[in-house]
Image: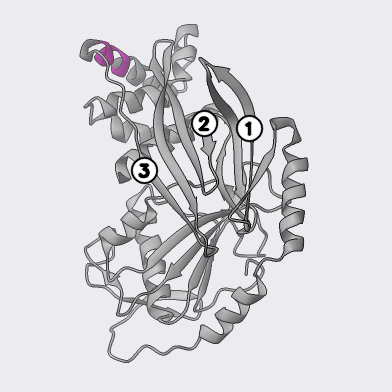
Amino acid sequence: MAHNDENSFYDKKRKIDIGHKEGKAKFLKHVCALSNSNPKNNSYIVIGVQDEDNQIIGVDFFDDSKIQNLINAYLDNPPIVQYENIPFPHLPDDKVVGLVTIRPIDGITSLRKNIWKYYGGSVFFREGSISMPKVFDIEIKDINSRLVSAIENHAKNNIELTLNGVFDFMNKRRDYNPQYHVFKEYFVLCWSGSKKEVKNETFYSRVDIELINEQVRLFYSALDEVAISYDDRSFKIIEYVRLGLQQSFKYYKLEETLITFEDNANYSIDAKLIFEPPQFNRKLLHHIYNTNNAILEKLEKNMRLAPHEISDLENLAASYLICYLNGFDEALPKLDYIKPYLKRQSRNLYQSYKDTMRILRKVKYS
């Protein structure tokens, strides 16, 4: 699909950004249009593909299981939407191709309320490769079911692809204790990570988890600590995040993901947020917040930072987040504002910023 032109059941994007109203609105528009234009078959959005030449360049791993919440909040008669991370052999470890699968339900899908420049009640359809607003006055025609079914059948897995996928994973991650397990005599799940023991508990960093049969990456993290457990029918991941102030840090549980494998060759993924925001002294937080603002002002004016400010800069995004989680509402717009400044500073700072925003996104959607 990535190498073909867009059409009435398929759209491709360089990236999506649902952290801002414009990005949310455009994503909702495309979901609405694809759902309405394909009442009897799945439709798809592939993310991480250049529009001009179909080059597969990938995007960051996106692990927000709450994307359906966004759909339900803004669309009437919402379709079922699933986001999957698809690894490609030529992409770096931290890049995947995003696959959005849209499963329509009976009836017309429309915007429930205003967002950005689109009005509540708007209905969108696909005109070839373009999502357009339209007054609905005719019956929706089913024109794509046979073609989509053929594409999906052609893409089905087989034992050769599964074995190749297992060997590729084991070879690629051989420095990080790769393992695999077969669930219900059908599903092959591979995982790897840098292992360490802390107080009789086992944790992993640099974790990579793939469901080989489905060719889907379920989890990827270069930094976070992860606890893994499994039995004959399920695989559980508990993700921890490192947060703190003034060089005093702790690991906090962020999210628990349970993958359950059934006898009928189906599986389900249930993710729940278990994050309890760390609470700090209000006077200390005022000091941290003012210090952050002083650093941000220097970045705006391109002024040299003092040695102690350089150290504080490394935790700028995370400390703004802690301020917000402790009731400093004015810290939230600061998080959005500092993005270009941290991006210019260094790759590590920008990666730290993206990790912080991922935590914020999970908390907000929950």
Instruction: State if disc 1 and disc 2 touch (CB < 8 Å).
Output: yes
Q: Give the CA distance from mark 3 to mark 1.
A: 22 Å
N-term mark: 3 or 1: 1
Closest to the observer: 107 or 10? 107
Quick one: label 1, few (<14), some, or many (20+) residues within 10 Å? many
Q: Which mark is residue 65?
A: none
Reply yes or no: does residue 41 show up in magenta: no
Q: Earlier in the sequence, mark 2 or mark 1?
A: 1
Amino acid carrying label 3: it is Lys
**Label 3, on which residue?**
272
Residue 307 position (above or below residue 279): above
Check disc 2 and report its element: helix, strand or loop. Answer: strand
**Residue topped by disc 1:** 193
Task: Give x and y (percent) for residue 17.
Answer: 43, 51
Q: State the image quarter where residue 244 is shown.
A: top left
Residue ID for mark 2 = 226
Q: Position of residue 135 (x, y in %)?
A: 28, 83
Q: Amino acid at mark 1?
A: Gly
Instruction: Give the farthest residue toward the top.
Output: 307
Residue beneath the point at 52% across and 65% down: 264
Q: Residue at x 37, y 50 (%)?
A: 66
Residues drawn in magenta: 284-289
At a point 64% along the width and 72% down the height, the residue shown is 4
Quadrant (top left, top right, bottom left, bottom right) of the N terminus:
bottom right
The type of residue carrying mark 2 is Val
Residue 93 drawn above or below residue 88: above
Q: Quadrant of the C terminus?
A: top left
